[in-house]
Image (cartoon, grey):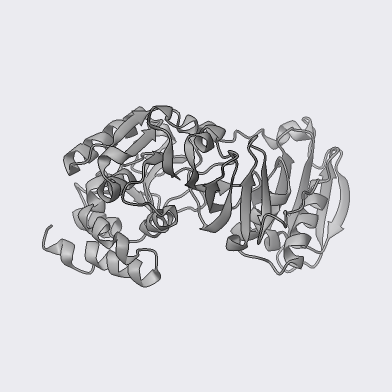
Amino acid sequence: MTERATTEAGPQGLASRLMDSGALTSDWLSTYQAVLRESFVPDVIWPGVGPADGGPVASIDRRTDPEGWFRAVYSDTSLTTQWDDGNHPGPGRGKVPTCSNSQPSMVFSMLAALDVQPDSKVLEVGTGTGWNAALLSERVGSENVTTIEFDPENAATARTRLDTAGYNPVAVVGDGSQGWPACAPYDRVLITASLREIPADIVRQTRPGGIIVSPYATEYGGEAVVRLTVEEDGGASGPFVGSSAFMRLRQQRAYRTHVKEYLGGRPWPADGRRTTTSLPPEAVAGWLPMFAIGLQTQGMFPYPEQYDDGSYTLWLRDTEVTSWASVDFVPGAEEFEVYQSGPRELWDELRAAYAWWNGQGQPGFERFGLTMRPDGTPWAWLDSPEHPVPAVG
């Protein structure tokens, strides 16, 4: 370890901050110290850029700004390492971030939720830069770790970093949603990409009593980490343990139809039915209300169209391309103009979902949970599986 790495800006400083926050616990400290984050970060990074935030427009390159790169590596922030499936080299932003070295507090919070034991067999879905695979290999031994990555370039560079650091887990290039049956069954599964559906193959490859930790996103928006325990009948159930914002698993990415298809080529408001609402779009714009709305609704997603004067239009659309709604937000207004079209009244569905969440006292992520039946059918619940979240629409 270099002299500067022991300063407040280096690994020890980050460890102190993570332990103060509770993300890094004492039982993971020696693993953290043995597996330097810098060994799993490429030369070119975009700090703080995620799927739900803007972040800086320029990269940091270790070859031209080694001090800036080092500070970024030992900050508690995610580091985007790839854009647009590798089709954008930089130095500015690409369109979509598609690989990162995750935020350290999130990494260690998820590892704590995973609750690995000394002899646990672990599957990681989403090798990324290889840091998680190295941490798990240090903790339970490389022979007990399988890691799978869809992107061949990311997989190859991660393999090189793992080899250099002295770790040799089973490293697979393939579709992580299918798991890796050759090494199953697993005691623990860590998924480091956002899911809209928990893959049935993953559940089947996990032992009864085994634990699956994964980011889970609703179609509408919002996301949280779920901790599922696999049951004897092949189902799985467990609570959400905190907010998250991960890149989507490539096999579950959403490809949206443009709003002009919903309008049928006609100018807005086309055949939209006009009403007004006193519920401001701002009230439903946060990550938590979006998550609560998404747990109750099916096949609905939002898009805010921003204007220079601070106003915006909140568009709602359905994935079946049958219905749309628009709500115009004007700062300072008490009533907002609504147009709805199609067999579904999407704004009314959203309003009902928000009203239920608000009526429950606006519960946080940790009060929600998810259950997967043996046939793969999911249902969300509040506080316990005996209190399912109501479906709207």
The residue positioned 73% from the left and 31% from the top of the image is 261
Relative to the observer, which residue lies in front, 122 or 107?
122
- Judge whether residue 329 can be spotted in this image: yes
Q: Position of residue 299 (x, y in %)?
A: 71, 40
Q: How many marks?
A: 0
- Judge whether residue 9 can be spotted in this image: no
The residue positioned 46% from the left and 50% from the top of the image is 50
Relative to the observer, which residue lies in front, 120 or 216?
120
- Residue extending farthest to the front is 232
The residue positioned 58% from the left and 62% from the top of the image is 366
Relative to the observer, which residue lies in front, 102 or 165?
165
Image quadrant assignment for residue 8: bottom left
The residue positioned 43% from the left and 54% from the top of the image is 110
Decide: is 225 above or below 150: below
Image quadrant assignment for residue 319: top right
Decide: is 299 above or below 352: above
Q: Quick check: 78 left or right of 34?
A: right
Q: Position of residue 122 (x, y in %)?
A: 38, 42
Q: Quick check: 337 left or right of 56?
A: right
